[in-house]
Each structure stands twice: as structure tokens, then as C-alpha cells.
Image (cartoon, coloured by chain):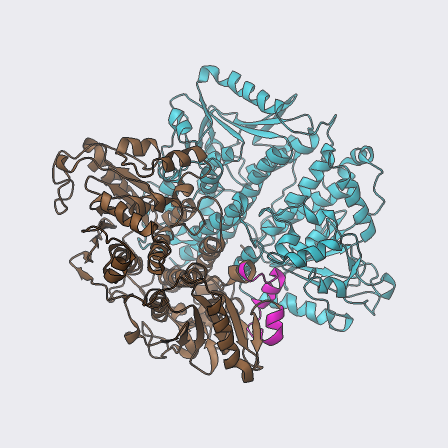
Chain colours: A cyan, B brown
Amino acid sequence: MAAAAEDAAGLAAEPGAGDGRAPVEFRTDPSRYRHWRLATDGPVATLAMDVAEDGGLQDGYELKLNSYDLGVDIELYDAVQRLRFEHPEVRAVVVTSAKAKIFCAGANIRMLAQAAHPWKVNFCKFTNETRNGIEDATAASGQTYLAALNGTASGGGYELALACEHIMLIDDRSAVVSLPELPLLGVLPGTGGLTRVTDKRHVRRDLADCFATMPEGVGGRKAVAWRLVDEAVPPTKWEESVAARAAGLAASSSRLSGASGIELTPIGKARAGGTISYRHVSAQLDPAGGVATVTVRGPQQDPPAGPPGIHEQGAEFWPLAVTRELDDLILDLRTNELELGTWVLRTEGNLRQVLAYDRLLLANTGDWLVNEIILYLKRTLKRLDVTSRSLLALIEPGSCFAGSLLELALAADRSYMLAGTFEDSAGPDPTTPPKGPEAGPAVIAVNEMNQGPLLMGSGLTRLQTRFFGDGDGLAAAEKQAGHMLQAEDAERLGLVTFAPDDIDWAEEVRIAVEERHSFSPDALTGLEANYRFTGPETIETKIFGRLSAWQNWIFTRPNASGPDGALRKYGTGQRASFDRRRT
Amino acid sequence: MAAAAEDAAGLAAEPGAGDGRAPVEFRTDPSRYRHWRLATDGPVATLAMDVAEDGGLQDGYELKLNSYDLGVDIELYDAVQRLRFEHPEVRAVVVTSAKAKIFCAGANIRMLAQAAHPWKVNFCKFTNETRNGIEDATAASGQTYLAALNGTASGGGYELALACEHIMLIDDRSAVVSLPELPLLGVLPGTGGLTRVTDKRHVRRDLADCFATMPEGVGGRKAVAWRLVDEAVPPTKWEESVAARAAGLAASSSRLSGASGIELTPIGKARAGGTISYRHVSAQLDPAGGVATVTVRGPQQDPPAGPPGIHEQGAEFWPLAVTRELDDLILDLRTNELELGTWVLRTEGNLRQVLAYDRLLLANTGDWLVNEIILYLKRTLKRLDVTSRSLLALIEPGSCFAGSLLELALAADRSYMLAGTFEDSAGPDPTTPPKGPEAGPAVIAVNEMNQGPLLMGSGLTRLQTRFFGDGDGLAAAEKQAGHMLQAEDAERLGLVTFAPDDIDWAEEVRIAVEERHSFSPDALTGLEANYRFTGPETIETKIFGRLSAWQNWIFTRPNASGPDGALRKYGTGQRASFDRRRT
């Protein structure tokens, strides 16, 4: 009983991260897919789900009926990314199933039932991000997603469809869409389902309520009448209708034209001795202190002259390479290093070169690849915003927090910028490049990248979020665009939190990091999830805020995850036993 | 360990509701206050907090340093209500402390530490509603609240100040404002603190982060510079400055003028044999079925001709009387009947009379009392929106779901409206008035009350929420204003969920109610909390959504509420022990 109760609270050492198993790997490519088939035919790509039952990331469950676990979703994420970068010709993407009679049964229930709480939460977060990425591809990249439900889509399967712009359901008297989480499992359709049904598809909320209590689902004309799907198509017309709809979506796509894609070559990465190293990004892991120090390095060379050079460099082009590495690192640390509760964010490099790369990108937003790179950086920064780790930015001499990289400091919960120079030329960390007096004082710079292209999920820039309700402060900061700002100015403008000098620096930073480690990890997660989203909410922020927070609560409750909870009893033939008190 | 873990999950039978103790009573009046002193002096009222240490609602804690429990907040709620109705002359309200050196230490920690989870959640919800009511009084009623912090305001004490329009802090080198919940207790400042600091007061989010990790708080000029307070005033100028500021706020108030208030006479109420009865409202409690059937009765007489008659009737005026009773019932059932997970909402009476009362109110919104009554109804309906119970409206012959009372059906998660008439003249419940063929079919009616005066916390009407994203549907429904709509029309227009006829009615309703009872109470709470707030979010909805949901999660976690959690260890001299995994 005690052990089971612990497990309900997420304490048990069950499959999940942080238990000594091999780290979860997010890097993959189509040659290694086990669960998806990606095919392109001119402007239309087809992503067919064909989950290998024995291909679960962990032991203890079979991925029947196209149910998914994190491993399945990692492949989906990779496919969505590759379509954007490797296939400029693709203007519509059909998401369908390669199996008969079933589109997707949603997240694997046995996987969820056996998973520790942090694993559930991380899994849902990544799944949400992938679905948001699908919507971003439709809205900003001109790759419009079409859900072709050739069989039943239940739970997370329907939620995947909800992320698509258009939903077609085969009308064969058998296929339905459903959200059976509440009646069958005692949890929510927490991967955007509840939010998108009402806020995106405009299903009337009372009908949405009924729908979410009907494990048998809704199909055919009723599914259309309730706005759950856009079309119900008889089997005899299925293939031709899907093809016609995909062709129509492709024809009306706003995708920027491009002759040929670039290859997302494998990301080089080493993990050894408490360090994760990429070419432009690295992380020092300090388990005792609960800290990961992430260092992002600026470009080592001048930017190419224009788009031809960018295309030629492809995945080696610094802004794309650094974003891919940062993206992988965020996912890795989040999933595999749960006890590193604080991420210290640093940069190193030539700030003027960062600005030069930004200028190149901003001057060529009409180029499809440049557009994709900026959008990818936007999505990667959004990952930081919803990461349940304290983010502290350290702005030191030799750093390059400018424009796109300044967003790292603006995403942080706090920032510390050295006023003046370090007297000791090595700085606090002898392994890093010289940062002493000869490096000159640290500077930061705002540019156009901070004023629109890299919006948060709330629809605000990070500067707007920072100066929410303070129009004068925002205007003063934006007016400094292009200027090199030293610590005193940056602090006065409100662009950094603190600007200690050499005498106080090491002590202040040490205290901040140690103090963070002393606090309740859960309370920090809640605090940061609130403060980071000042101001308006959107479908996206509602999913990570209202919906996910409620789902996380429900996941911890005995009514779901206790030994007699619905999630644990599902499939056993026994009924769940509920504490009936409404809370 | 097992028992303790159960307690962390809120299962233990600790002080709180539903454990056989006497029900919590929300009705009070100033003659019975133990914790507040209410005084008025012309246009300025003073609400002085003077909490009786031995006046806790439950045993096991002392209310030291003006810390509060639910009982203290019930008095505050009563005082805020009375100021609105009994004191039309009051245009500014000073909230201060009658104790030296301390304004308010926030929610009592021992009370929180010993409370079961549902109690914590209910307590926070009511506290939030009272603070929202203070903001509503400032914004809509012309009673502007001024926080005069004559000593330290920490935690919930500062959150109370945050609900006020203007915050003055005495600058005596001792008084500070603080949010020590995270560092000391491992929970959030969850009564609006995190949201109001950034979204209302526009404290920069990194400074807000620092502030919420500083148990020592911030005082003096720094508190002003960080926007945590509006003024820091030296002790020598304190009284005169507070008086001058209050006078200034009163002078610029928009309060509608009124010669004399009305008395909020005691609400008559009987609780016996599974029934709670008021004059216009009653509830049948069915513990076995987990249902409370709430019946709201329409006016028994014609409305008075105009404002003089309304003022003369005072608290007997039907719209005010029914709202007060409904308000009390909601609070009673929420707090004392946790296992009644479904509220069936019914009405009885003359629909045309309801419309006549609504017309009287709408024609006289310039009258201060009419304004207050409408605002009170608005706040009471908002309570329904955030109530963690399934709400099912039954619209039967003899009911009066029109205008203001139609909001009950629009607030519900689903509604069932009888098509045609009952053949059996008794209807399904023989104790209610005849509803057979002679009563005629049920009708509903939309009016202006559904189109603006009774906004939800999201800033939308319940009709706008219902038809979110469906402008045509909304326009079609609003176009029917004033028309008596039978079930078929109401269903076609989307104003009700289902319209079964006499043959199916009893079975369909029974299944809906029983089915609801079979589901996980937690999952239902999460489902409803998402669906009810379609569309935009405001400070208010963010507090009940993002903030409260995270807080509820944190409350269930062993890091806060487990035997070694911070909330339980506070004051013991022992440090909390944390599971360091970030989630």
C-alpha cells in the first residue's frame, strides 16, 4: 500500500528517466523509423502511422492498435521537421494510418499506467509540442496538415487529428472519433483535446461535454454536425476524396517556393564525464548541485553573403546547426536529467557576428529555408518557456547575448550581467575562453529578432512579456535596438535582473544557484509556469497552462493513479474505486 | 507511511468538510464578527483586520499575527457585501490592520498543514472569489479599495492587498510585503498572488521571481521601485496620508448616488431531512446518488413599478432575495457536501414574471441598488462557473428559465428540455407543482440579461462562450430575444443540449445523472474547468485556471503535503525533504 501510494505520487522507480536506464535518444531519421512511413508525391506528403507492436521504448506494454509511446512520437516529430527542411515542394501533408480499421488508439494505456508521474508529464509535454509544431507548419510554413482518419481515432489519436487543419473521417458505420479518457481512464484528454475541441473547432461546449463522456465515440454525419470532423466520406469515395482534398490544400498553400531541400544531417553529440557536447552547444552537468550549465557558442565565421550560401551550408549553417543542437539538448536534459532543476544559460562568442547572422536572416525572410530556420528557432525557444527547470542567464565578458541569442536571457527567470570586467582573466571557470580585462565588459544587444519573429506561445514577444503593462519600458528597450549595452545600461533599461561587479559576482551567482536548489521543485515549476506567461492566453498557452496543470493534478490523484485508480484498473476487468469527494 | 501518504493525497479524515462535523455556516453579520471591525465615516469606510487568535473555525491552530482561516474570510466577504448594499454613501474602503506592526500574515499555516486536500482547494477558491469581489466593487460599484499596510503583509496578506486598487505601505524600516510561500512552505502564492503581481501591477517577471523567493520580503522605496506597492509612507505622515488618499479615491469614485442603503436582513434557511430550504431556493440532497437537485423559484408576485418600490422591498425584492439564497446554497453545498458531485438545476414559476423583473432591472441600471443587484447576480453565477460539480439543467413544464434565470441553464454543462408535455400530470417528481399537459410545454426565453450584464470571468457572456467561434449561431440565438422558445426551437438554435420527449425523458435524465456519478470526480473537475472557459482568459480566469490548477497539483505532492513536505515541516525546526525530480 505504501509503495503503491508512493507510485501514485510519482516516486517509484518505474520505467522512466532518472532510474539508471539508458538516456532517451531524440535523434533519429527515416531509415530508422519503426512506426511511421513517410512518402512524398510532388506537393503532397503522406505520413502513415504503422506502429510496431513490439517497438515500445520500454518493456511492459505492446503498442497495439497504433497506440503510441514517446518513441512513436519522437519519430513523428522528426518526420514533421524533415518535411519542413528537406521537402520545400511539399505543401500538404496527409496524416493517416497504414493499418486497417484503426487510425490511432492514442497514448498506450499500459505505458501510462506503469509510468512514474514525471514521465507522464514529460511525455505529454513533448506530445503537445509536436502537435503545436504541426499547427505551426500549417500556419507559418505552408505545409497544411490533413487528417485522413481511415479508421477510428480515439483519445490521443483524435487529438493528433485535432492538430490538423482539416479532418476527414471514413463513414463506414464503424469508424468514430472519441475521447474516452474520462470515462475509461479517469484522466483528461490532456494533449490539447479539451482545448482544441472548443477553442479551435468550435464544438459547442455542452456537446463537447457529452462527447468526452462517450467512450463509444461519434461517427458519420453526427461527427460532422457536432463539428468534430470536417467531412465524413464513404469508403467507396475515400481515396479519391482524400487525394482531391490534399491536392486542394496544396494548391491553396502559402508555402514559399524552393527548388530543393537541405538534408538534416545527423547531429554530432558526445555524452561523457558529466558533459554533453555538440559543435556549438555544450552542457556541464552537476548532479550534486542540481545544475546544468548550458553554453551556446556564437558563429565561428562570417555569415555567407546571401541565400545561396545559406542553402549551400545547409544543416551546417550556424543558426540552423545551433538551433538543432539546442533543441536536442533541451529534450535530452528535460527527459533524462530530472534532478538538474536549474539550467544556467551562457553564451560565448562574437556578439557582432551573431547580429550579422540575424541581419542575414531578417533580410531574407522570403526565402523558404530562412523562414524555416527562424520558425524552428521560435519553436525551440518556446520549449524553454514550458520547460520545468529554473532558467538563470549569466551574461559575462566574451558572451554574445544579442538578438536571437538574447532571447535565451529573456526566456530566463532571471539574468545576471557582470558590471565591468573580471580582474582574473580566467573568469570563474578556467575551461572557458579568457574573460578578463582584455575581453572588455559584457554587452548585450536588442535587434529586430526580439520584436516579432520569435513570438512566445502567448502571442507576445519576450520583450513584451517582460514589460507587460509598461509601454514606456518596452519602448525604451526597443529604442536601443542595435546598440551595444553594458551592464549598467542594461540594468537601468530593465533588460537584465542584476548587474553585480567582479567583487560580488561569484558570490551572488553561487547563492542564487544554491538557493534555487533548496526550494521545492514542484513549487518552482508552478511559479515559473505562472510568471513566464504574463498577459494574454492562446490555445497554445491554455493547453500548457489550464489543461496540462489540471491533467498533472489528476495524474497525481489516487482516483487515477492509485492502486484502485481508473488508470491502473483499466483492462483488468475490475472497476476503479473512487474517492467521491469533489475537489 | 501509508496513512501519511493517503493524507498527502487528501484522503485522510482530517478537519474539513464531509467528516461528520457541523456544516460550515456562511451567513453572518457585523454583530457577530470576531475578526474584522467595520466602520464608516461619510464616504470612507475602514475595514480593520483584528483576528481573534482563539477564533479559528476548527481546532488545532491559533490565528496569530492576523493570519486567517475560512472563518475570517467569511466575515470579510460579508463585510464587502454589506458595504455595497447597506452603504451607498461609501465610495472608498480602507483595508488595514487593528494590530500593531502586522497587517496580515496570510492564511494560517497550521490550518493549511492539517487540512485535507478538498478543504484547501475550497478555502482557496472562496478566498479568491472574495478578492475578485473586492476588485468588482472597485471597478463596477465605485467602492474603491485602498490597502493601508500599517505593518507587514505576507503571503495571503499581501495577496489581499493586491486585490485593492492602491497599496500604501508604512515605511518604518520594519514593514515589508512578501510572498514567502515558495521558500518557506513549498507551495505557491495561490490566491491570485502570482497572477496579480505581473498581470495587474506589472511587476517585471524576473523581479517577481526574486520577490517570490525572498521570505524576508521587500519594503520601503524598493517595494515602490519594483511596483509591489504604490507608496511607502513614513510613520509620521501615515494617518494623514491614508486619510488623504482615501478621500481622493472617494472623490473620484464613480459610485452611483444613493440616499440610504438597504439592510441585508438574515437569510431564512432550514436544513433537515436531506433538504435545504430557503424561501425561493431549495435543494434535495441524494447522497446515495451523489446528486443535489437545486430548485430556484421565480417571483410570486408582480414586480414593483420602479426604483422606489425596489428600495422599499429591499432584501425582500425577489432578484436580490433569490440571489442571496442561491449564493448561500452554492457555498454551503460546495463546502459541506463534497460527495454530491452533480447539481441538477431546476426552476419553477412564471417565466413572464421573471422577464418582467429583468425588464425592471434593465430599465433602471442607473439606480445604485439595481446596479448592485445585477452585479451580485453576476458574481453568484460566476461562482457556478468555478464550482467543481457537474451542472445539469432540467427544463420542464412549469419552469422559468428566462433571461437572468436562463443563465443557470447556460452555466450548466448540459441541459435537457422536455419536448411537448408530460402525460402524467405530476411529472417525474410528485412533490413539485403539476407539470402535466395543463402546464403547457416548457419554454425558455433569451433577453438582454444574456447579452452583457452577467459576464463570465473570461469577459464573455455565457451565450458568447456557448457559441464561441460561431457568430451565426450566436446571432441567431440573440435574435430570438423576447420570444418564448419551445424545446424543438431551443434545440435547433443550440440553446439546449437535448430535447427528449415524454417517452424518453425520465430514462435519459436518469442515465445522465447516474453516468456522471460513475466517473472519476477529479477528471470531471478538470474536464469542466476546461470546457467552461472557452476562449479568452483574463486575470480572473488565469487565477482559477493556470494558477489554481498548478497550486492544486502542488498541494497533492509529497514535497508539500507529505510527511516530510515543506508545508508539514514548517515550524517544526526540521527541514523539508524533497524529491528533487523536476516535473
Is A74 part of what is drawn in magenta?
A: no
Per the image, is B218 magenta?
Answer: yes
Horizontally, residue A532 falls left or right of residue B335, namely right
Which quadrant does the N terminus of chain A fall into?
Answer: bottom left
Is B578 situated above or below A15? below
Q: Is residue A273 in view from this perspective?
A: no
Q: Quadrant of the C terminus of chain A?
A: bottom left
Residue A105: quarter of image: top left
The x, y position of residue B325, in whole percent, is 26, 58
Instruction: State left or right for residue B420 relative to residue A580.
Output: left
Give the farthest residue toward the right: A438
Residue A556 image position (x, y, % from top left): 43, 53
Of residues B408 and B521, which is closer to you in this image? B408
Q: Position of residue B493 (x, y in %)?
A: 35, 33
Residue nearer the viewer, B583 or A339: B583
Residue A147 percent across, percent down from the top left: 52, 28
Q: Quadrant of residue B94?
A: bottom left
Which quadrant of the structure image shows residue B140?
A: bottom left
* Span of residues in magenta: B200-225
Asked if residue B508 is positioned above or below residue B524 in the image, the reply reads above
Q: Residue at x 59, y 71 (%)?
A: B223
Report whether residue B293 is seen: yes
